[in-house]
Amino acid sequence: MVLNSLDKMIQLQKNTAKIRNICVLAHVDHGKTTLADCLISSNGIISSRLAGKLRYMDSREDEQIRGITMKSSAISLHYTKGTEEYLINLIDSPGHVDFSSEVSTAVRICDGCIIVVDAVEGVCPQTQAVLRQAWLENIRPVLVINKIDRLIVELKFTPQEAYSHLKNILEQINALTGALFTSKVLEERAERETESQVNPSSEQGEQVYDWSAGLEDTDDSHLYFSPDQGNVVFTSAIDGWGFGIEHFAKIYSEKIGIKKEVLLKTLWGDYYINMKAKKIMKVDQAKGKKPLFVQLILENIWSLYDAVLKKDKEKIDKIVTSLGLKIGAREARHSDPKVQISAVCSQWLPISQAVLAMVCQKLPSPLDITAERVEKLMCTGSQTFDSLPPETQALKAAFMKCGSEDTAPVIIFVSKMFAVDAKALPQNKPRPLTQEEIAQRRERARQRHAEKLAAAQGQAPLEPTQDGSAPETNLKGEEPRGDEEQVESMTPKPMPQEENNQGSFVAFARVFSGVARRGKKIFVLGPKYSPVEFLQRVPLGFSAPPDDLPPVPHMAYCTLGNLYLLMGRDLEDLEEVPPGNVLGIGGLQDFVLKSATLCSLPSCPPFIPLNFEATPIVRVAVEPKHPSEMPHLVKGMKLLNQADPCVQILIQETGEHVLVTAGEVHLQRCLDDLRERFAKIEISVSEPIIPFRETITKPPKVDMVNEEIGKQQKVAVIHQTKEDQSKIPEGIQVDSDGLVTLTTPNKLATLSVRAMPLPEEVTQILEENSDLIRSIEQLTSSLNEGRNTQMIHQKIQEKIWEFKGKLEQHLTGRKWRNVVDQIWSFGPRKCGPNILVNKSEDFQNSVWPGPASKASKEATKYRDLGNSIVSGFQLATLSGPMCEEPLMGVCFVLEKWDLSKFEEQGATDKQNQEQSDLVKEGQMGDEKQELQDGCSEPFEKRTAQKGEASLSDCYGPFSGQLIATMKEACRYALQVKPQRLMAAMYTCDIMATGDVLGRVYAVLSKREGRVLQEEMKEGTDMFIIKAVLPVAESFGFADEIRKRTSGLASPQLVFSHWEMIPSDPFWVPTTEEEYLHFGEKADSENQARKYMNAVRKRKGLYVEEKIVEHAEKQRTLSKNK
Amino acid sequence: MSIFTPTNQIRLTNVAVVRMKRAGKRFEIACYKNKVVGWRSGVEKDLDEVLQTHSVFVNVSKGQVAKKEDLISAFGTDDQTEICKQILTKGEVQVSDKERHTQLEQMFRDIATIVADKCVNPETKRPYTVILIERAMKDIHYSVKTNKSTKQQALEVIKQLKEKMKIERAHMRLRFLLPVSEGKKLKEKLKPFIKVIESEDYDQQLEIVCLIDPGCFREIDELIKKETKGKGSLEVLNLKDVEEGDEKLE
């Protein structure tokens, strides 16, 4: 075993037919990294004794601590089989669900994969997932059944039992593959059917038998795993052995003299050997005959394990000699049987040979890329290959050819960006010095030494005059040289501090065609780039240098930076990379966000987006510990976003930075990365703030025990009245149907407001059209100022009328007569889902632009006051009375607007003054002060002195009073109606297998979720459940559902709508029935109240909660203490 | 029973005393700790959960019960429970540890909420979260004063926080409509208040849309009223100028 030099690798890279790009996929803890270790040790990179313990590919610290892989990483290996030399680009991938995005990135750049299955645990949820992923990416799998030793040592199976167990596992996996296959066939058939429906020209007769055509016609035998096909290997990576059928077939064909081909077919399966007849016969289980596999293979291994575990020295020696192996004295004497086993087995059945031989034989080289896969990669979304422009279609040939000539277009796919410490980059690494360099340095050191001596000598004789200048200059001359030296010795070491801190991004990529060279100019195509767009914008056969190209969205032009050979945690510099290889590219961080396609031709389409099994679902809010470090955090999060394919980062309206990750473990890793790598600050993590909305509803007809209200006598009316009193202070008139009348503090204006719930559909329309409403608002405001109205586009006008029509359609009935025409404003922020309706007689104003709302002179007079009213309404809708959250679906009707007193004053000055209401207001203010002697004196003085009209009296400006009064009136109008909270809801799509369906339901119902529908996915045993779930209950939901279903169900959450929580947050039992049912205190949890109190507590609002529940149960402090 | 013996003392531990002076005499009642404030705010409705005993004392710690005559002369009744209720609602209270704690905490939160509501990060125009503000307040060792309103204190906190972090009050967007004759002159006067002028339009009137610090709204308002003699007008377009909507980092 020789450590392969870089040159060797470079040479191997050029032979595309001998390259294998593979990845290792499996469920978590099935031994991917251990297997990778064994393969790496075969190349001498790590010691074979450490293989399986070192976990070479897990280069992160937390990976080593937790013992799970968290990122996919690649390594290039060299394998010699006979005279043929292969280059194997091995990618190790994580098995944990949270990191399945890393699996996706790995699978994309491979041609084949090794599926590892634990012999004891069998097929696990992630095994299914990775099989599906490999299938979707169209890459060919081979199977490794790992941990056979556990069958012997832990489960103590007999060889016969082990055989049937293995057979079982194989069947399970093949069943899965079959299911994938059928679902694909069914899908294709469905597609075909829809197509044939589109063009019904095809004959009827064909369709009659078409239903059976799907499965039987398509050949699927090559898909399945079977040892006799050579695509299954049995291993024990921890003990370092593994074998395929072929290995034993070879041995026994020599030994027993049966043809190898026959043995290959019969070694696996129910065959037994009849030694006397020298025949292999089909076994009959009842006869108790052992199958060949058991007799010839398993029993031998079993006996070896048996001997070693029992420390049967003689037997071991016998086996060793009979196998013709040499065991080192140290291993032979070792007391740990494990060491002995691995020493024997790794020589007898070396795992790397078995696995790599299979890989080289069964998995395709980059040259064998199937046309089907190429087409799939190139067609984004629902596009078909034929619809692509001809230039693009031409590229398919390049793909298939995978040529390395200079003329071949360069196509590279970047599947992810990963951060590397600047230290680890080859150009910054301390390199061993070459001979010449060492000689040079020695020379220089000698010189310096001599100079020093000379200087010392020069100074010693104390000749400070003319001669002294010589050594001085000499010294000066030496100084820079010394610096140079220092610089030289510095450069190989890490860069100065800042750069070191930054780390840099390396793109994890694969060359699909052409040769990637350092410094080559190349187009970077984002996932949303479309070659069609480019071809439209740029005239055919453009000759301008690419830098002058017109900007095309999602396309950039850049130079390839450093190219690296990925060697696990190390990177090696490369000058060029021939096609079919996996490589790392530096210097792309400014161009590539997460993934991209690089191509020398702009006509290349971007590859289809990676297919993620898990979508980000766990949301947390992230904040810096010290508020001043906010910019660091933002920068760090941007880097994290780039480095992780499966992370989402949101900045919310509340100012929260929300991090969305795939799961708890993933979250932990992201936070660690943020803390230690990207942001380098202390951060704190919390549950994100959950928004609510407040609304009102119609008074209920029935009470909590479904009795009609009003029939039974109220028992505890006291409670109710007490609360009402506390809510509404004196001085407010409330009539029985909820009309609230309020006067401004200076008693000049009186407002009457009523609140009504809006129908649900109307709220929805308002929500959808918030942008339109905003533009209406802008229009009316410009109209009001008397500006020209030409800017109203016909289109917007039409939209507005359509919107109005829709509202009218839904707001029908006696209550809502003419309401749409009287809408004055929307709120909050002038575009929200609440309405202010103006029903007062003497003043007309509405939001609708056009001749209908042409502001009359009378109206302009009130405009400023009107603005105050609207502002009051806006404020009221922005924060409701329950927990200061915005309102939704409420209609405030301004029934009366009594300004009689105000007008009286206005009328008196009408003759004197011009029509300026502001002055009127001012005058009013003056008179007001005369009326009220209680005003503050300095104020009076000032106004008197200046003799000017001032708007303010002791209550502040009148407009401000009006705003406050309007706001209060709206609040009280709300409070007299039954108030409700609205919760944000997620729609939740859950994929689950049939057997965990019950648990999914349990988790959903525990978290107040509601299942909308459930259907089975055609051709599989997967169920798709659609449910809604309150956002407030979603924290930890993904984790819980995964735990409860052992990972067999994976949810996806998307915000969908607002939904009213039916329970009343202020509810207390009032009737006798309710008393019986709930008790006096209504101890049962009230969901709405729980939410409301939580929000109030968070905001520091008053919460009606006892500080101490039971007075007697407080700790009594004795006097002595 | 004029002799003061241990047997006729009612010694109570864990007491919160509520006192009241009436008719020159001091009366006390013995309550449970952390309960009196709850009773006053109406959260606690069960009197027995508040009162340790229904008797009225002269001195709780000594266990001296008030005399009947004194009670009648002071309250006009000898119904101990009624008197207890009166004392509970009107007497002076010892605020217990937990009560004080919750009050302070509540005010602290309230202040932080107000600050978070009024302020933005000037770089991003996005608000800070309440938790962050709370932490910053703790960092500057802000202590809550119970006798000042939370709003007042919030304004104070903003001033202090400005020294520590990048924080600013969210600007208010205003529109002035000024008569042309005085427009120029007035604009100069308004200049010091205005942070950013977004648009200026001389038509029949001078129209200015600008951002101001909400603190000087009143002054601007008064200035305009005074200078234009009511001809100019002022309109609030937006109470706070903040980035709206969620942003996805890409």
Image (spheres, rainbow, N blue to C red):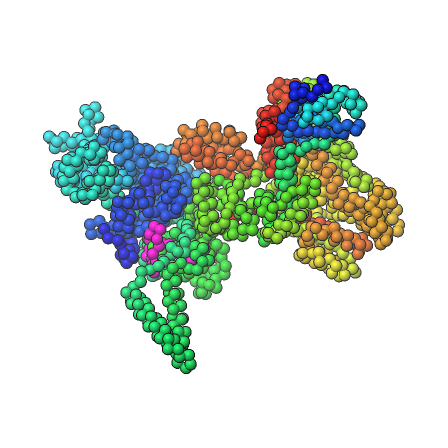
Counting from the top left corner in percent of width and height, residue B190 is at 73, 57
Residue pushed farthest bottom? Answer: A466
User: Magenta region: which residues?
Assistant: A566-588
Q: In this rendered view, identify the residue nearer to me: A929 or A556.
A: A929
Q: In this rendered view, identify the residue nearer to me: B36 or A192.
A: B36
Q: Residue at x 67, y 48 (%)?
A: B156
Q: Residue at x 38, y 35 (%)?
A: A125
Counting from the top left corner in percent of width and height, residue A416 is at 41, 50
Q: Residue at x 17, y 35 (%)?
A: A313
- Asked if residue A121 lies in the magenta stretch, the reply is no
Q: In this rendered view, identify the residue nearer to me: A550 or A981.
A: A981
Type of secondary structure dominating the magenta stretch: strand
Counting from the top left corner in percent of width and height, residue A50 is at 28, 45
Residue pushed farthest left? Answer: A276
Quadrant for the C terminus of chain A, please.
Answer: top right
- Vertically, is A371 above or below A323? below
Q: Residue at x 26, y 35 (%)?
A: A149
Q: Is residue A40 left or right of residue A660?
A: left
Q: In this rendered view, identify the residue nearer to me: A336 or A537.
A: A336
- Vertically, is A883 above or below A435? above
- Asked if residue A581 lies in the magenta stretch, the reply is yes
